[in-house]
Structure formats: structure tokens, C-alpha cells
Amino acid sequence: MNKNSSNTMALAPNTSSKRETVCIFGTGDFGRALGHKMIQSGYHVVYGSRSTQISNLIPKDAEVLSHAEAAQKATIIIIAIQRQHYNILTPLAEILHGKVLVDISNNLKLNQYPESNAEYLAQLLPGTKVVKAFNTVSAWALQSGTLDASRQVFVCGDDVEAKQMVMNIVRALGLTPLDKGSLLAAQEIENYPLQLFPMWKFPMVLSLGLTVFFFFYCLALDVIYAYIYENNNFSFFIVYTIPNHVCPVMALILLALVYLPGIFAAIIQLYRGTKYRRFPDWLDKWMLCRKQLGLIALAFASLHAVFTLGSPTRTFIRWRTGTGIVSQALNNRTEPLNITNAWLSDSYLALGILGFFLFVLLGITSLPSVSNNVNWREFRFVQSKLGYLTLIFCTAHTLVYGGKWFLNPAAYKWYLPDIYMLSLVVPCAVLVVKFVLIFPCIDKHLTKIRQGWERNPKYSE
Amino acid sequence: MNKNSSNTMALAPNTSSKRETVCIFGTGDFGRALGHKMIQSGYHVVYGSRSTQISNLIPKDAEVLSHAEAAQKATIIIIAIQRQHYNILTPLAEILHGKVLVDISNNLKLNQYPESNAEYLAQLLPGTKVVKAFNTVSAWALQSGTLDASRQVFVCGDDVEAKQMVMNIVRALGLTPLDKGSLLAAQEIENYPLQLFPMWKFPMVLSLGLTVFFFFYCLALDVIYAYIYENNNFSFFIVYTIPNHVCPVMALILLALVYLPGIFAAIIQLYRGTKYRRFPDWLDKWMLCRKQLGLIALAFASLHAVFTLGSPTRTFIRWRTGTGIVSQALNNRTEPLNITNAWLSDSYLALGILGFFLFVLLGITSLPSVSNNVNWREFRFVQSKLGYLTLIFCTAHTLVYGGKWFLNPAAYKWYLPDIYMLSLVVPCAVLVVKFVLIFPCIDKHLTKIRQGWERNPKYSE
Amino acid sequence: MNKNSSNTMALAPNTSSKRETVCIFGTGDFGRALGHKMIQSGYHVVYGSRSTQISNLIPKDAEVLSHAEAAQKATIIIIAIQRQHYNILTPLAEILHGKVLVDISNNLKLNQYPESNAEYLAQLLPGTKVVKAFNTVSAWALQSGTLDASRQVFVCGDDVEAKQMVMNIVRALGLTPLDKGSLLAAQEIENYPLQLFPMWKFPMVLSLGLTVFFFFYCLALDVIYAYIYENNNFSFFIVYTIPNHVCPVMALILLALVYLPGIFAAIIQLYRGTKYRRFPDWLDKWMLCRKQLGLIALAFASLHAVFTLGSPTRTFIRWRTGTGIVSQALNNRTEPLNITNAWLSDSYLALGILGFFLFVLLGITSLPSVSNNVNWREFRFVQSKLGYLTLIFCTAHTLVYGGKWFLNPAAYKWYLPDIYMLSLVVPCAVLVVKFVLIFPCIDKHLTKIRQGWERNPKYSE
């Protein structure tokens, strides 16, 4: 920088602190919010509008001009108008030629149009450099400055320099730009803010279905059976006892379902003798939602833990305890401690506590900020080794809890097993097959395949 | 790059690996720590000091020169001296002309001087490009490399290129620069490290005040009343029973206070028929501290959960249970199970557990790393839908818990209601008004207003 | 940009959307995965391979050429071959001259070779610009797109521009580059993915050792002593009672060990009269693993909490309660409430709950995403003030719990103290010394030293 220019700067500090001029087409809600924020960050903002009379809602330091005049003042033009009105831009093609157009539009539903709004804009105005950005940010968040939800702004575009200019603006506004590649990504970016936990849909539906099934299974065995055959009114089991039966069963089954696809994948790779053929689609999808399955399992396990810890304060349990003690007292005897029962009760409690503890650890390491701070080897160690240990503890907890009832015919009401027996099927299967898979001969073979060896190279697609 | 230059590079790899030269004025604690870190990152560091004799505390690879000599060696000069001594720089104005000066100073208290240190520096030396940076990093953290606290370095300045140069240095040191705009932001940046949880102040004071009030209210009703009228010494209630009464009350009230401002905002918008007029200041401030209120409510709810789960191990509860059972045994009878009580007890426990579970979910989604990974729609879904569900569960938990005592005159000691009745006022009001607001006719009107419609456009300021 | 160039762009949008060409040497697993991802992100990829026949595993849009031909097509060449085969590159020295070589290799164990792979490559081909990158990303994660583990890519290199080019590619792939400085950092970067929680090793070993010691100590006093002298079979204590004795002891000792090094550091600084001499190595290391010690202590505290809350559901506890009540009933009397015992029991429970609550708060603030959002002063406040408060609460909890047994000779089986007495030694020592250190006269002196004052300046090294 030569002396002259810095002299000028010293003389006119306010001008030099201004960043470049940005033009915004459209004076709607989002256009105003964005303009306001940009002015705060030192940009000079010019609005392009059909009616150039200055509305009192527009930020004070902004100019309002006609579209054509406004466009000539800036290199970057933010298109804050809706897709249906993009055609009003076609007469301006000559003026917009070579400019950077920022498409910030969103749709009302997923894949509303065959092509994304940004691509449509690029087709309408072929001489411009279209960049998709800002559509994931809400006007309210921009205005209030409380960006509790994502600060990430996805940016995509075909022109690298234009994209860089837009990303600089994003950074200047205190947001984090994330380059998603060429304009082909616009469809995905436009769909993003419309999504509602897409990865959670299948796990949620699955667990809801299973929960309903097990709830009515328990209702039949614990309440209706007792009412019909034993004439006991245990209707209040619906609110506490049955949920506390269903939660651990769900937790165990869902946890096992997290590790089942890995087992399937290993068997398929062993059978095919190569890792280069794609897994079936259902397996791919299953593997991608393992984290969600695991977290739902953790939610059920937590509910089970709190339900169990809270049970001594229940009226029913206090009544049952009291009645037992009173009948002992009336019979004039104290029962000696049954050491076996003490061992069993302490063991399943301790196994459950340890299993739950490891489960919570797994949950903590799946927090984004924690998993970003471990390397790949550590992440694998936690999610695989610790995960299997959790599964072993939880399965053992269930086995010890119900051990003595397996061979007891009284446990089979209506010839149906209790649900904790059903819950053991999947975890035990997973653990047995996993145990076979880590036999040295099989494990060695599998490792070889995973390092790229192929039994029959012609197989590869 | 031509062959010559890369040949030179090959011949002198050590030189080429050096980044540019940076000058540091001042050899105090922070200056030394920063220099040390910069040398580690490959910069060449020159210290400018009044006494040029090489102190043994200064990093070995750094040069120490007079201020004038040091300044000539670098484009970037870090001013690691205190504001009071900035005047020693005025004689160097000629040499510093056009250089990038990095102001890293901090004050001892908020808004200590009328203008920020960085702006003061820019006024003293008008020909320089002043950039504010590094003031949020501690010398100790730089030295030890344990940057557990924030890696964020706020940067601001009027010259974009100068700011870019400083941000590159910040990145090279393994820190994350965050561009805060022009030098006007310096005041805010200088205040930042002096703040102690500013957003938490009002919620903390409010909850402390309410807690103290409810504590003494309970003390009067539960301990003093029992002592005076029933001659029972329940003084030990102070440490366990009363806290476990106050915590749930606080949790419920604070949770309701999170949703109250949203209700007020909706009513104000409906009344005014526009969303374009600013809310009153108190409402704006209240809305900005909702997250903090919610987290404090969660803390109280957690304490209540643990206090309740722990109560069966209390001496008092064990004594009360034992006495009850012994008196039954001595009277030679077993009481039958009261089904209604069993229903009530199981219901309020289950409602409380589910409410607490949803509350913890809300807390987890407000962790920064989780909320950064959801889009705006998902964040709103969790914080609004799930939040109201939590409030409904927790209110129902309280209602069912105390249901049978509302009409019981014995519950009104000294004609005062128990605190759980007081705690229901705000949540019930919020839920009732919210229920009215989601009536289709009102909801439709409100949605129209929130999309920009105005009943009376002249109203807008 | 002039009109011509933008016209060309308009005519050939597909070409303009392509980023530059990148060459990959080696068609192994990682080379293919990286190429695939790069093509998705809009790069043109050319593989350099010994056999140029197109394998069907290579991404479809990539070319496969000989090493020499491929290298000529791109400025950036990714070396996806193993260190042992780097010598095949030496004949290409002429062609590679001035190119950017990206070393992505990993080793099988820590510090396998005297120099890092990247430095070795730079020595082999002195005219090239070697950049280390991508070694921390797994091929599987790249392919599947599920980057749950770290998105961070460490980058280092001697040439700033070459590094910038590679960092741009990293960003374009949706990953986060982190500049680690010059090529000297390559050794550290190559070691990173091989590490398995290096900071956790010492704390884990220490706590494992202490746990084993205390377990057998308890086993001797609680089980073996009772079996020999009282002829009671309490073998089942092994699974529940003893773990619940060991956990709180471990939690308290480890928490005290978090604050002990700070005490040592203060004493050393007071004794030396300067802060400028390095602490002994063991103290430095200890200070760096305080966070890990604290988190392990929190894990033990959590286990203790759940074990305690779960104990009323144990068969043994239910039997003991029942037996006590039955014997009261058989003796025809109800014991009055012992107010002192009620006070003691409620106090230690409440102290424990509050201590645990603060401990969990400390744990939450040590989550990376939370600690990134607080400034240095807030972090210090939480970790120091809140930490000491936690230690005070937990120590008081233990003191009140065991208070009445200290002077009771029956508590000393085999003349050995119970482990909770042992657990109090370190925390009490820490608290007493800390109490002395905050005496105004000493604290003032210490603050002076920490601000840079030296009693005896010649001491400084």
C-alpha cells in the first residue's frame, strides 16, 4: 500500500471501514433482516424494489432504488424474491451479466420443483454467476442475533471466485460458511431446512411399533390374566409396572439391533469373499441409522433406570413390603437371609448399573463435540469394544434377573413367555455369532478381505 | 513458480519454511508467551523493547531490538504494552506509518475508558492499520498449550487486508479467528474477557430470590407450625424435606416463565395487529434469557429427582415406614391395598419421570454442538413442541400429586396454601392461554401477522 | 471479469463448474475413496498407476495413466502409496519438480521411522513442495459419507501457498482443515491416528491400581473379617456393597488429586519467589491430566450415586429392614425417632446430592462445545471456584457420614481404619493448605509472583 492511499484512509476513516456494496432485490421479511445485519457488519446495502418509495421498515442506512439502478451499484446481488417472480429478472439480463446472484430462496415442500431454485435462476440468466446461500438461516435469528440453532450456512455454486465472495460475506456476518460444491448441490441445500430429523424416522417408527406391541403383550399377561384367573385388580400396572417392563426390553432389543447389521455385513463379506460389492440397500440404510437406534435404546434404558430407582416410593410397593413384614410378625418368626437370592439380586443390579454406565458413556461420545475430538481409532474403540461390552453387561443383567424363571412353568401364562425372554433372542444371537466371528481363523480371513483381498477377483463389478 | 525460486527453496529448506517476520513491542508476560508460540509455528519474531539487552526469559530464537529497529523489520507489529504507555509510540509514527498494529490489550473493568484501547491507538497513530485481536486468549493457555477454554479469537479492524493477515496468524497458531467487523466492535471485544456469565445474571438473581422466599415459606409451614401447634421437632426438615419441596416448585415456575414471554408476544402482536413494532424492552430481554431460565429449571428438576429417589434411604423415612408397619402388626391386621391411592401414586411418579425425561432431552439439544447440527425447523420443533409437552407433563405431575389436598382444609395451615399450589398458578395460566391461542381462528390470524400482514399499516413506525 | 470470459462460461457451464485437476498416485483403497469423493466435489481426477489398464474399482469419471503422464496433468499430486515404495518416485524427480505432493501415509506404530514419512518424501524429492494431510481420515468414512468421527484434517507443510491449495481441497470435501505449521509437525500428525487416548493412560492406570487396592482392603475388612470372627457369610458383598464402598472413596481421592498439583505449584512458586522457573516434569504432566482425573472421579461418583439410590431394592437391604421391624413388633414396642440421627442422615445425603450436582455441572462445562463458548474468566471461575466448592461438599459428605465412628474402637477391625477414613486424608490436606494459601498476606504475595514479580531476579534461568 503506498503512502497516498493510507493518507486517504487516515483522512476518511469512516469510508475506509465500509466493506463493498451489496445489492438486495426484494424488500420482504428476509431481505430486510439480511440487509439490517449487513449494514451492522459494515456493508453498504442498496435495495432493488419495484416501488422505490422508501418504506419505513427498511433499515435506515440503506438506499432503495429501482432494480436496474440498484444492480449497477454492486457486484453481488442477493435475490430475496420468490421463485414464482424470478421472471421479473429476465429484462435485467443485460445489467446482471457477469454479476454474482445469491439465491436465498426456500420451497414449501421437499423436491417441489424438478430443478432447484438456484439452477432455475442460472438457466433464466445464463450470463450470471449463481451462488446458493443463506437459505438455512431464519430471518428471526438474523434480526434478534440469537443464533442458537445452526450458524452453518451451506454455500454452493459453479464459479469458485463468486462462491468465495459470498463465503466472505457469510463469515463477516458471524456465520460459518460450508462449501457444498457445485450448483448441483442446490437441490439438497434447498431441501435441508425442510427436513425434520430424516435419519430418525425409521428408528422412531420401529421403536414405536415395538413399544406398542410389547405394551399390549404385557397388558394381557400382567393385568388381564391376573384379573380373569386370579381376580386381582392390577389395572394401575398400566402406568408404572408395564412401562418399566417394556423399557428395558426395548433398550436391549434396540441395542442388539445396533450391532446386528455389522454381523450381517461380516457374514456377507465372508460369503462373497470380497469387500468390493455393495451391500444390499436395506443393510446400507440400517448401518446408517445405527447411531439413532443406539440413542433411542439409551433413552429407554434411562427411563428403565429411573423407573426402577423410583419404585420404592410407590404406594403399591410400600403396601407389598408392609404386608409381607406384618405377616412375618403375626406368624411370630423372622426369615433368615437367603444367600443365593442376595447374590442374584445384587448381581443383576450391579450388572445393570455397570451396563447403564457404559451405555451413558457411549451416548456421551456420540455428542458431536466429543466425537470431533477423538481420532478414528479412538472412536472405533469406544463404539465397537465398549459397545459390545455394554451389550454383554445388559444381556447378562437380563439373564441373571430372570434366570430362575426360565424353567418354571408358572412363568408361562397362556403358554406365552414373559417379554424379558423375548427380549433375549436378538442380543444372544448377536453375541453368539460375534463370538464365532472373533475365532482367530475366521477373524484373520475377514481382516484379509477388509484390507482388499479377494477370493475371486472376477466377482468384482 | 519458476525453476529458480524452487531451486533456492530446495537449497535452503529451513529458510523457506519460515513464515513472515512479526514484530512484538513489549517483553511482558503475554508478549513473551505469544512470541514463543509464534516461533513454534514457524514465524520469525523480533521484539521491540526499551532495553535491548537480551533477557533470558525471551524465547531463544527471537531478536531483541529497539522499537524503531524492530518495527522496520516487519509489516505486522503486535502491541503488547499497556494502554497507559501507548504514548511512547507517538515518536515512532513515521516508521509505523502503513504498518498493521495488533492491539491485544485488556482493561481491568468493563468500559474503563470512553473509547476502546484499539480505537485510542488508531487515533494516536492515524497512518496505521489497527487490528484488535488475541485479547481473549490467556498467556498461560498459550504457553502450556492446553487451550481447554475458548480457542476463539475475536478479530476486528477497519482494514480488510490487515485483518486477513492477522487472521492468518491466528489460524497458524491453532486458534479459530472470528471476524467481528470494523474497529467499532473493539469495545465489545475488550469487554468480552471481563464478563462473567452476563446472560445468567438476571435468571440467577430471580431464581435465588424465589428460592429464598419459598424456603422461608416452607420453613414456616412445615417446621415452625408443627413445632408450635403440634409440638413436633422437625428441624431436620431444613436439610432435606424443604429443599425437596422448593426444588420442584422452582423448576415448574421457571419452566413456565420460559414460555410466558412467548405468550405475551403473541398477545401483543394480536392486539397491535402487526409484527413490525418492537416489543417492550423488558419482553425483549426476557426472551433472550429463556435458555438460561430453562437450564436453571432443569437444574432444580434434577435436584428434585435425586432428592426424591434418595429419600427411601433417609433415617426419617425408614423410621416412619417401620413405625407404621409395627403399629399394623401390633393391631393384628393387614390393610388391603387402596387401588385409588396406587393409581394416584403410580400416575404422578410416571408423569414426573416422563416430564423429567423430556426436560433432559431439551437440555441436551441446547448443548451448542447439538443445536449446531439441527436445522432451524428441527430446533423449533424440539424447543417449542417438546417444551410444551414437558410443561404439560410437569404440571400434570404436580396436579395429580396434590389433587386430593386442594379441597382439604387441613392443607391450609395459617390459611396459607402449600407451595405446590402456588407453583401451579403460572404454568396453568400459560397452558390455558396457549390453548386459546391455538384455536384455529386465532392461530390463523396470528400466522398471517407473523408472515407480514398488518391490520393497520399506518401503525408501523 | 470481462465479458468474453463470462460468455465462455455461459456457453460451457459444465466445464466451468469443474475445479482444477488433481492427480492421485496409487489405486489402493484410500486412493480410490479419496478420488471418488473428489470427483463428487467437482474435481477432475487422474490416477497415476504402474498398470494403466482401467480397473473396474476405480471411479468411472477418473482417468488412469502412467505415473509420468498423470503427474504432468496436475499441480497437486496425492501420494497414496506406502512409504516403502516411495523410491519408485525418484525417477520422476524431473517431472515432479515444483509440484505439490500431498503425503497421506500412516505408519503401523508410533515413531516407526526416525523421520516422518512426509519429511522422508521431501528429502527424496527436494524440488517438490510436500504437504502432509488426510492421514487422519479413514477410507471407509470418506466412502460412506458418515463422518461421525473427526472431520478435522491436520495439514502441515513448508510452502504456505501449497498448503493453502491443499486446505482448499480439504474444505471442498466438506472437511475442516487445521493448519499445524511447518513440515516438522508431520511426525506428530502421523502419530495422531495411532494414539489411543494418550492423555488418559496415566489417570486410568492410577485409578485402576487404587481401585484394586481398595477392593481387596474392603474384601478383607467387610467379608473375610466377618466370616472369621462373626461367622457371617457376606460373600455377596463383593458385587454390590464393596463396589459402593470403593466408588465414593475413589471419587473423593481423585477429585482431591485434581487440586493437589495446583497446591504444589503455589508452594513451589512461593518458595522460589518466581514464576519463571519451570515446574518439575512430574508436576507439569500431572497438571496436564487434571481434566482426565476429574472425569474419572465423576464416573466413580456417578456409579456411587446409582449404587446408593438402587440399594433399597436389594434383597439384602429389604431383608435387613424387614428383620428389624419384625423384631420391634415382636418386642411389642415402637422406637421413637432419634432426631440426631435424622439430622445426620439428612445432612450427609443432602451434602452428597449437592456435591454430586456441582460435580456434574463441572463435567458438563468440560464438554468441548461448552468450554468453547465461555471466556477464560468464566472457565476459570467454574473450574476453580466451583471445583473447590464441589470438593468441600464431597469432603463434608464423607465427614458427616462417618463422623460418629471416628472415635469408636469397633470401627477399627484388625486395627485398620475403614477406607472412608483413608479417603479423607488427601482432600482434607488439600483443603487445609488451600485455606492457608488464601490468607490475605500469602495470597497477595502469590498474586504478585504470578504477575511477574521476582524475589531474586538472578534466580531466573
Image (cartoon, coloured by chain):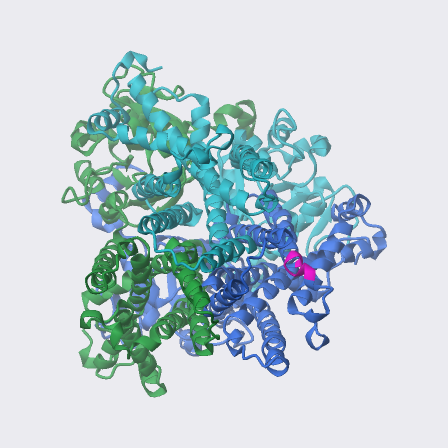
Chain colours: A green, B cyan, C blue
Closest to the observer: B113 or A238?
A238
Q: Is residue B362 above or below residue C270?
A: above
- Image location of residue A276, percent across then percent down: 24, 73
- Image location of residue B360, percent across then percent down: 41, 49
Closest to the observer: A195 or C460?
A195
Closest to the observer: B8 or B248?
B248
- Image location of residue B126, percent across then percent down: 61, 27
Q: Is residue B146 left or right of residue B1?
A: right
Magenta span dominant secondary structure: helix
- Magenta includes A361? no
The quarter of the picture where the C terminus of chain C appears is bottom right
Residue furthest bottom as drawn:
A441
Q: Is residue C268 left or right of residue B115?
A: right
Q: Is residue B92 visible?
A: yes
Q: Is residue B51 left or right of residue B199?
A: right
Closest to the observer: C222 or A191?
C222
**Image quadrant in which you'd find residue A175:** top left
**Image quadrant in which you'd find residue C208:** bottom right
Q: Is residue B413 above or below residue C190?
A: above
Residue at image point 44% right, 66% down: A330
Q: Is residue A61 above or below residue A295?
A: above
Q: Is residue A268 above or below residue A243?
A: below
Magenta range is: C399-404
Residue furthest top as drawn:
B458
